[in-house]
Amino acid sequence: MKALVLLALAGYACVSLAAESPAISDDREQSAVEQYAYGMELDVARVISISSDNHECAVGPAWMTFEDHQGQRHTVEYRQMGDGCSNG
């Protein structure tokens, strides 16, 4: 009987977690992310944000969200060196 109750609670917990929708607070999740290619012409009227989650001493992804001259929002993913390098 206890096993049945535990199994039911575990199933309920899984369903609750699956139904939970995270709030979209990051600009790059709201619009389609374009991959930057060398030579790509960007129409940047206003930069909204630049972000990176690369904290290693290696090349990794970074994102720039901007508005073009027509007011449309774009997000571009590009590669940059992480901030985990030290001079010593």
Image (cartoon, grey):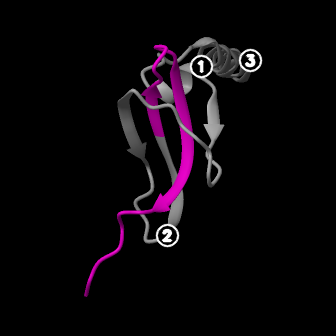
Q: Earlier in the sequence, mark 3 or mark 1?
A: 3
Q: Which residues are magenta?
A: 64-88
Magenta span includes 67 = yes
Amino acid type assigned to the residue bearing label 1 in the image: Leu
Q: CA distance from mark 3 to mark 1?
A: 20 Å
User: Nearer the observer, disc 3 or disc 1?
Assistant: 1
Q: Does the residue at mark 1 contact the one at mark 2 (Cβ under 8 Å)?
A: no
Left or right: 33, with 49 as reference point:
right
User: Nearer the observer, disc 3 or disc 2?
Assistant: 2
- Identify which residue, 4 or 10, lies in the foreground: 10
Disc 2 marks which residue?
58
Amino acid type assigned to the residue bearing label 3 in the image: Leu
Decide: few, some or many residues near mark 2? Use Cα within 10 Å; few <14, some 14-19, many ≥20. few
Disc 1 marks which residue?
17
Query: Residue placed at 58% from the left, 41% from the top?
Result: 41
Q: Earlier in the sequence, mark 3 or mark 2?
A: 3
Query: Residue placed at 59% from the left, 19% from the top?
Result: 17
Q: CA distance from mark 1 to mark 2?
A: 34 Å
Decide: few, some or many residues near mark 3? Use Cα within 10 Å; few <14, some 14-19, many ≥20. few
**Residue 4 — which label?**
3
Q: Secondary structure at mark 2?
A: loop
